[in-house]
Amino acid sequence: MYEKVTHDICISVRPFYLEEQSSPDEDRFVWAYRVNIENQGDETVQLLNRYWRITDKLGRLQEVRGPGVVGEQPVLKPGESFEYTSGCPLTTPSGIMVGSYEMTIVGGDRFNVEIPAFSLDSPYDTGAIN
């Protein structure tokens, strides 16, 4: 598990390789990742936007931006958490993801929360250094 706390928001990520959705012979490797967002502060916050930097084994970069996560813009009161699962396909057997969430204190300022870098490794890349 990968974890990082920014502005009293704890982001933890657990990636896992999806063998049944992958086709290594066709250069298709698929991962899911489960993210838990926990408000450890004392103000209510809302997740507005997401930003991802996905780098494959060959160093090719893909950026993803958009509103919310899995169609939601969750509001988290102090002590509350929100968990979701999403996925990432690559054409290489390994990669790295890192990103951030734009959040707001309800009725107040916006701020960014860092998502820890996490490794996407498959059993088909025994030489991975991620």
Image (cartoon, grey):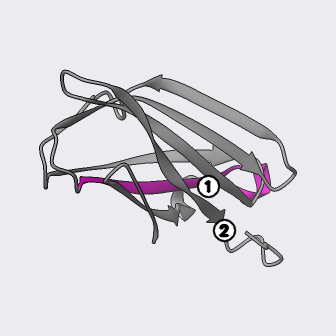
- Secondary structure, mark 2, is loop
Mark 2, mark 1: which one is toward the viewer? Answer: 2
Looking at the image, which is closer to me, 36 or 104?
104
Residue 45 image point, x, y percent: 22, 36
Q: Residue at x 50, y 65 (%)?
A: 16
Q: Which residue is mark 2?
A: 122
When asked about the image quadrant of residue 119, the answer is: bottom right
Residue 129 is one of the magenta-drawn residues:
no
Task: Point out the stretch of residues depicted in magenta.
Answer: 22-39
- In this view, which residue lies farthest toward the bottom? 126
* Residue at the image position 60 percent from the left and 49 percent from the top: 98
- Left-right relation of 99 to 93: left
- Looking at the rendered structure, the secondary structure element under dot 1 is loop
Q: Position of residue 128 (x, y in %)?
A: 78, 72
Reading the chain from its start, which is encountered first: label 2 or label 1? Answer: 1
Give the quarter of the figure containing the C terminus. Answer: bottom right
